[in-house]
Structures are given as C-alpha cells and as structure tokens.
Image (cartoon, rainbow, N blue to C red):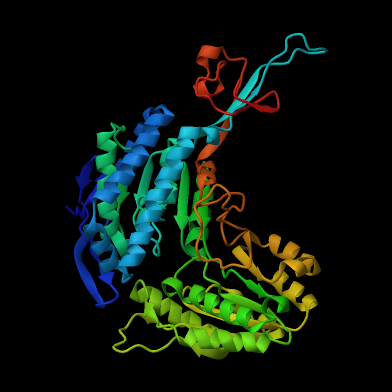
C-alpha cells in the first residue's frame, strides 16, 4: 500500500493543509498521488524521535545494524513491480533505468552492511601505556570513531532510489548508528513513500528503536530550513544544485552550534582529448561514439555528465569532432525528469548559445512531447572560453561544449580557470603520458576523480571511489558520497585515556573481542 502521509518513526501523520502532486513528464500531467507539506510540529516530532533513538541505536551491536540494513534491502526488493511502475511514472525514465537504480541501491545497503561486518570503519587505534617511561610515564590512549547524531538527508531529483530515501547518504548514516530524517524530493514523493514503508517494515522486524527513521514531504524550502536549524540534527547530506547546497551549508554555519553539511553539487567534468588518443580512425570513431553516449545518458541528468571537452589541436582533431557530431545526431533525445528541469536546461542552452557555435543536436523524434531534452554540442575557442565564465558552468542536461585549444600552454591556462569538479578525464596513450605530466598534475588540483581513457558517467560503488571534489563540486573535498568511506561523514574520533578495560567499547578492549584489525602501538594487528 502506498502511504502518502509522512512517516514519523513508526506513525503516519498528515496535519498539513497545503498539498502538492508529483508529475509525469511523459504525459505532461500530474500523477494521482497527493501529498501534504509537513507542518513545523511534524518536523519537530521527527527530530525529537530521532534524538531519542540515537543512544539506543548507536549502542546496538555492529551485527544488529548490519541485519537492519540487509532487511531494508530485502523489503525494497519485496515491493516488486509497483515500485518500478511508480518510479517510471514520476520520472519518465525507462524501466531498465529503474531496475538498474534499484539494484544499485540494494548493493549500497549490502556494501555498508559488509563494512559493519568488518568493523574497520571504526579505525581503532591503541597506544599502550608505559608507567616506566622516563622522564614521564606514558598514559594508555585508545581512539575510535563514534557516530555524531541524527542526520537530515535531502533526496536528489535525479536518483529517486540510489541518492534518496534509502540511498547512499541514508544507508551510510544508519550504518554508523545515526538516525535519519529524510526530506523527500517533491518530484518523486510516491517513490520515496514506498521505500519509506520498506524501511519501516525492516525497522520493526529487526526491533530498531522508534525514531531511527522518518520521511517527511514538502515542496517548499521551509521544511528543509527548519530541519537544518533544529538543534537535534547533527549533520546534513545533500545531492543537488550549487545554489541549494551552498544555501544549506551557510544555514548550518549560522546555527549557535554549527554542523557539517556534506553537499555533492555541480560539476562539468572536463575531458581532455590529447592528439595521440585519436591518431587512428578506429580510436576517433570509438571515442566519439562513447562520449556521445555519455553526454546523453539519462538525458544528461547526471552530476558526472561530461559538459566540457578540451581538444588539444592536432592533425586529426577536426575529424574527431566530426565523428562526435555524427554519433551525437544519431541518438534519439529522451524525456527530462520534470518540466522545471526542462525549463532550466533550455535556459542554460540559451546562455551557452550566446557565446558558442552549435555543432550538433540529437535526432528529432516523432510525436515529441513537451519535456524532451534535445541534446546539443557547441564549439568555442580557448580565448572566448576564458572571456565568458558562464560557459564554464554546469548545464544540467544532455549538453557539452567542445573547446578548441591551440597549445599545451593554453590548456594549462584553461584548466586553472575552471572551478572544482567531481571528475576530469584524459584521453591519450600510455606511451605518451609522461609528455603531459603537467596536465595531469594540474587536473589533480581540480578534481576528486581523475580518469584515464574512460568516461565519468558510471560511479562505481567501491572503497576506492572518491565521489566529491573541491568546491563547488562538494562542500568538503576530503569526503566521498559513494563507497564505504562515505561513512566517515557521520563519524567523529574520540580518545579514551587510562580507561579500565571493561569500561572501553569492545573495539578497543584487550583481547580484541570483535576480531578487528587495529593499530596497536603503530602496527596493524589483530592481537
């Protein structure tokens, strides 16, 4: 059953009188489901329950929390086809995309459950005391990570499952022992409601404390503002625009007690095409097709969409661009997520068009509806790129700008001009990497993930993944929103000095009851 009310702990609530509906961009009509905006009282109740749940939840064993995460995955899968159907109706995305994103969501939950199984995220460190050390005795010090408290997670517009209600922010926070209050994205509130019902069932079946999870709906900014300012909230997870993430960050810093905001925001994910990468016709054709697909994947509605392509001039540069244009025009455009996103994309294209030359658009389709995102590739020279910073900014959709670069020196200059990014990609050959060492080093200072001979779209859920970058790609480049290390956002270290063994957390006790790898006097050990 699809509950359109707010889920507050284990109770459904609907006290607000202002309502909204989600939207089907294919039919260009509202969906059947009506949602009420959460009232201030409902929001406060959710945070109060989260605060009350924190102590008992963080005290649960790692095994118990891992069981909870796996139960969430099982309950999401048990929702079956209705979840996929609602997802598609609210987004206009294909069923295959819905199935893929559901699989990713389940995999993320299992990833964090496995992190709990291993316990390494605790980063246990033991420096044994030495009463005989001179001139002063050495105290016994033991350090580990503990959860920071209740977290607010803002659902993302472009990932109704993997970056929303039970997505990476929520899953990683729950894994750490932090209760979560989700502020669902209003574009896919019904999808979020179904997932919330799965989390509720999992929480009840595994006997989690009440308030460990809540799901609130609103299509205004007021709910998000209230949640971020609530003293019970100790951290924020956000995936969305630079404007939205920056506003939340500034709001959180204005509190009497500031809290961290981990916002993953805008990125144009520059690509550098070196002449050596396109020396033969096969490689030119292959890279052109690959990047045409990456630009238009999901109608370009990814934070890793390659929005800038720096082409260092060589004998085959024009042919590569021609091949890219040819491959691009053979791709059929697809629906964007919402009329507002389509409107913003159209506005962004207009601003790019004021300074760049149109090279290609995606193929027209019969019976085109109002929210199809017509893909576009523009071309600009390096001098114009420097002159107009607007061209550097993200256009959320299937658009990319080819920048013709005359020399390696100019390429260095242009790289210094761009803001922080999630990714950068370099197309080249292994035999010539050394020739362009300076380019790679310059890009390292701008990104969180540097890709050689690949595409930025497709973010692997892996312990080695860094999904974050220098501002404005994210609010703190030291952290990732994807992979096991995403848990570090919701933790803080604490040291215990001269504690009796029985008073210590199990992760730090003599005898190592959890069988963890720990740093013992500077060396990794399971002793």
The residue under the point 48% across, 65% down is 241
The residue under the point 83% across, 13% down is 135
Q: Which image quadrant for residue 389?
A: bottom right
Front residue (pair 26, 297): 297
The residue under the point 37% across, 75% down is 336
Q: Which image quadrant for residue 379?
A: bottom right
The residue under the point 38% across, 56% down is 155
Quadrant in the picture for the C terminus: top right
Q: Position of residue 291 (x, y in %)?
A: 54, 76
Residue 408 as seen in the image, left or right of residue 387? right
Front residue (pair 276, 231): 276
Q: Position of residue 305 (x, y in %)?
A: 52, 70
Front residue (pair 397, 390): 397
Q: Position of residue 192 (x, y in %)?
A: 30, 55
Taking the image as drawn, is residue 196 in sight? Answer: no
Q: Position of residue 213 (x, y in %)?
A: 33, 42
Whether residue 174 is situated above or below residue 238 in the rendered picture: above
The residue furthest right is 135
The residue furthest top is 132
Whether residue 77 is situated above or below residue 93 in the rendered picture: above
């Amino acid at each position: 059953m699809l509950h359109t009310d707010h889920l507050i702990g284990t109770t459904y609530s609907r006290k607000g009188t202002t309502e909204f509906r989600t939207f089907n961009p294919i039919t260009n009509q509202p969906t059947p489901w009506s949602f009420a905006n959460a009232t201030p009282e409902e929001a406060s109740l959710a945070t109060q329950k989260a605060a009350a749940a924190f102590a008992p939840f963080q005290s649960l064993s790692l095994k118990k929390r891992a069981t909870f995460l796996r139960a969430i995955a099982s309950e999401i899968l048990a929702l079956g086809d209705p979840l996929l159907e609602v997802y598609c109706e609210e987004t206009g995305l294909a069923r295959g995309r819905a199935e893929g994103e559901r699989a990713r969501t389940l995999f993320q939950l299992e990833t964090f459950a496995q992190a709990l199984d291993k316990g390494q995220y605790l980063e246990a460190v033991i420096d044994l005391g030495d009463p005989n050390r001179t001139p002063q005795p050495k105290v016994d010090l033991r350090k580990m990570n503990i959860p920071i408290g209740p977290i607010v997670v803002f659902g993302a517009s472009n990932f109704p499952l993997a970056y929303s209600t039970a997505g990476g922010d929520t899953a990683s926070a729950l894994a750490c022992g932090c209760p979560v209050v989700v502020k669902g994205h209003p574009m896919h509130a019904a999808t979020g409601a179904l997932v919330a019902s799965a989390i509720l069932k999992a929480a009840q079946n595994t006997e989690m404390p009440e308030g460990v999870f809540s799901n609130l709906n609103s299509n205004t900014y007021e709910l998000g503002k209230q949640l971020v300012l609530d003293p019970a909230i100790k951290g924020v997870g956000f995936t969305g625009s630079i404007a939205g993430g920056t506003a939340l960050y500034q709001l959180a810093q204005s509190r009497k007690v500031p809290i961290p905001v981990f916002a993953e925001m805008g990125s144009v994910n520059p690509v550098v095409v070196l002449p050596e990468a396109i020396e033969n016709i096969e490689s030119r054709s292959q890279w052109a097709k690959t990047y045409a697909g990456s630009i238009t994947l999901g109608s370009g509605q990814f934070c890793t969409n390659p929005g800038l392509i720096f082409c260092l001039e060589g004998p085959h540069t024009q042919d590569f661009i021609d091949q890219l244009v040819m491959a691009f025009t053979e791709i059929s455009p697809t629906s964007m997520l919402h009329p507002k996103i389509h409107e913003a994309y159209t506005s962004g294209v207009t601003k790019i068009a004021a300074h760049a030359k149109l090279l290609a658009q995606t193929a027209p389709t019969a019976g085109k509806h109002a929210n199809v995102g017509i893909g576009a590739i523009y071309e600009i020279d390096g001098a114009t790129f420097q002159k107009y910073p607007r061209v550097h900014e993200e256009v959320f959709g299937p658009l990319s700008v080819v920048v013709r670069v005359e020399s390696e020196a100019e390429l260095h200059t242009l790289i210094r001009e761009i803001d922080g990014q999630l990714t950068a990609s370099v197309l080249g050959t292994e035999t010539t990497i050394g020739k362009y060492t300076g380019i790679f080093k310059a890009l390292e200072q701008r990104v969180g993930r540097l890709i050689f001979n690949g595409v930025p779209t497709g973010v692997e859920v892996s312990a080695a993944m860094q999904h974050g970058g220098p501002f404005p790609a994210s609010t703190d480049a030291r952290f990732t929103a994807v992979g096991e290390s995403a848990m570090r956002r919701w933790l803080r270290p604490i040291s215990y000095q001269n504690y009796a063994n029985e008073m210590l957390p199990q992760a730090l006790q003599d005898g190592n009851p959890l069988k963890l790898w720990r740093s013992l006097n500077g060396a990794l050990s399971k002793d």
